Image (cartoon, rainbow, N blue to C red):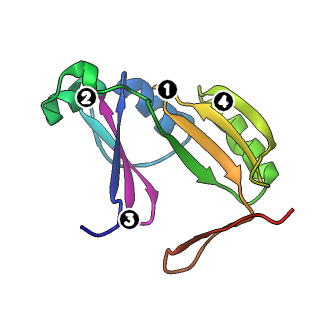
Amino acid sequence: MEPRLDLLTVAVPDLDAARRFYVEGLGWAPALDVPGEIVFLQIGRGLLLGLFGAADLAADMEVPAEAVVPGGGFTLAHNVEGPGAVREVFADAVAAGARPLKEPQEAAFGGFHAYFADPAGIRWEVAHNPGWRVDPDGTVHIGAVEG
């Protein structure tokens, strides 16, 4: 298996609320929207985010419904060009219905960041990390930020 991620599917308790947040609230265009089933959003070059109702995802995986916990155990991250962009993205997300978790502020890693949760409880970090860059071929470089 190649070290690559093509699709990240997350369980949401209310697919319609998730659609409203990402599509109507944040203005993201679906790559494919199957009402009542799943919404796919392109979130990077060759990468989709699938929003799948929690009960339906459990059924698809043939596991008990309680085995699929919406919004659990991970964060998604969105890197931006500076502290002002962190503040702007955070404010836009909150205006779209996100729950603020950590207000925009200096980060221990030397950058600037904030956290919010979407209506399903999926946690996002919005960050400016001066040690992060992506080459034209998609290779990611991340290193220590010099103080």
Magenta region includes residue 42: yes
For label 2, the residue is 36
Q: Is residue 51 left or right of residue 107?
A: left
Kind of residue sitting beneath label 2:
Gly
Helix, strand or loop at mark 4: helix
Name the kind of residue labelled 3 in the image: Gly
Q: What residue is disc 3 on?
A: 46
Q: Which mark is residue 112?
A: none
Mark 1 closeness class: few <14, some 14–19, many ≥20 residues within 10 Å: some
Packing grade of label 4 (10 A; few <14, some 14-19, many >=20) is: some
Q: How many marks?
A: 4
Q: Residue at x 77, y 39 (%)?
A: 104
- Do labels 1 and 4 touch, CB within 8 Å? no
Secondary structure type for disc 3 = loop
Report helix, strand or loop for mark 1: loop
Label 4: which residue? 94
**Which of pointers 4 and 3 lies earlier in the amino acid sequence?**
3
Label annotation for residue 121: 1
User: Amino acid under label 1?
Assistant: Gly
Secondary structure character of the magenta stretch overall: strand
> Magenta segment range?
40-53
> Which of 33 and 12 lies nearest the eye of the viewer?
12
CA gap, disc 4 and disc 3: 27 Å
